[in-house]
Image (spheres, rainbow, N blue to C red):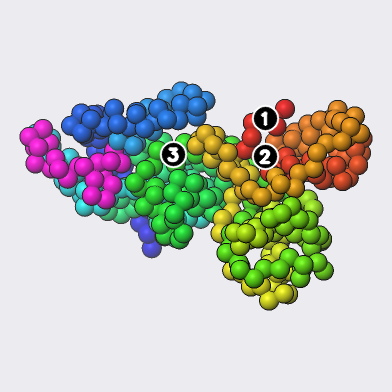
Amino acid sequence: MIDYTKIRNICEKNSSISASFIDDFFVYFIAAQEGLQKKVFRQLDSFQNIIRKMPDGWLGMVASQLIIHQAFKKNGLAGKYIRHVKLQQRTQEEQEYLEFQIKHPWRYSFCTLKKQLNGDFFEMNDVVTGDTFLLYSPGITRTKNDLGTIPGMWLFLIGFNGACWQTFGSLSYFKGFQPFDIFFFAKQLRPEIVFHNEISEVIESGPVPFTMLFSGAELPVSFHKKDMVVFHRSDYHVDDFLPENFAEDFRIEKKHPITMLTSKRWGSYPHFAKCFHHHKKSHLILTAMTERGYTALLASLKRQQNTFPTEPDIRATPGMLFTAQNILGTSIDMSPYEKHFSKPVSPEEKQILDKINTFARLLIDRLNNREAYEIAELAEAAGIDMENAERITESIVKKLGDNSWKG
């Protein structure tokens, strides 16, 4: 049985040493020795569009966290100074603390809370490595109480004290991000990564962009009834793909050299299950906005002996797409061939733009407030037909990362 009182005493002693040694001395010492303050703030300057919107005091906490991560990460800078004269002048307890931390590297962890065990002790699951670990963090308790709910995911810088893990610096929470979102974001930073086990190295070698994800902390998960709205996409090189063979299950449109196949059953809101085939490049893209839609898409393809992996190459919530585009200052096109099939607005359609804008405002208001809604009811309230309503809904969901649609 775990002796939480004993471990809590270890944690409190560790926190006391950390406050006097790291907070009051070592973070300034290592920053001066390695010029880390300038280096870190130079990296942070690239994200001023995010930083200016963050709470007061957040930047200083993140900067200190990034500096100390450079010291105590695996093969970090702290080991260079173990015999430095200024460190030899510190107490024996502090020197032993430093040696222990160097032997037990700190790391960033995206994790979910599996269970609150006892007071400020939590069983956490690292969504990148799959590891489960014991964490002591009064900050989680405070954040949980302030929010009145348990966020779906967290980002911490954690260090080991010999009995459990503890956090250092800012605690970032995310109400709507999912574990697969972290792979998506890592891949935007380093497109060549393929496997989930490559994420840790991307984070540890360049954590600054990941700390900016806190700007999306409050974005909720989007649902339509029981379906979570999630971008699904896979890319394949297919030499012998014949779109005509799929006419039974798909509506087929061609804009040479691209063919769009829209699922007859799963092609409308909220699933938007579609394929795009570029004949000259032998490039096939599978897309859907729900897991059920993507699964149905695969099943339709399988009926014609085209078998693809069950898991998509990438998945991303609309909240992550929105946040990633803001952080990186770029547009991320999840369906690059779809623009070739956009239809020009006719003079008749222009006459109902006011009604369309009314529908869009009603929908966006409900999405932002996580309120239940029916497209048919919103369409009736705005005075537009269902075909337009579904088309507008698809456009809004797919442009969640574009500020231009916000009302």
Q: Which residues are magenta?
A: 68-88
Q: Label 1 is placed on what type of residue?
A: Ser
Q: Is residue 238 left or right of residue 226?
A: left
Above/below status of 126 relative to 396 = below
Residue nearest the observer in this picture, 132 or 261? 261
Question: Which element carries disc 1, helix, strand or loop?
Answer: helix
Depth check, mark 3 against mark 2: the one in front is: 2
Mark found first going from the N terminus, 1 or 3: 3
Looking at the image, which residue is at 24% across and 45% down?
76
Mark found first going from the N terminus, 1 or 2: 2
Q: Label 2 is placed on what type of residue?
A: Lys
Q: Label 3 is placed on what type of residue?
A: Pro
Instruction: State the residue position of label 1.
Output: 404
Residue 209 shows which numbered tag? 3
Residue nearest the observer in this picture, 220 or 251? 251
Q: CA distance from mark 1 to mark 3?
A: 23 Å
Residue 76 shows which numbered tag? none
Residue nearest the observer in this picture, 316 or 6? 316
Quarter of the image for residue 217 reads: top right
| Principal secondary structure, stretch drawn in magenta | helix
Circles 1 and 2: CB atoms closer than 8 Å:
yes
Instruction: State the residue position of label 2.
Output: 399
Q: CA distance from mark 1 to mark 2?
A: 9 Å
Looking at the image, which residue is at 47% across and 36% down?
212
State whether residue 71 appears in this view.
yes
State whether residue 227 appears in this view.
no
Q: Is residue 58 left or right of residue 378?
A: left
Question: Which element carries disc 3, helix, strand or loop?
Answer: helix
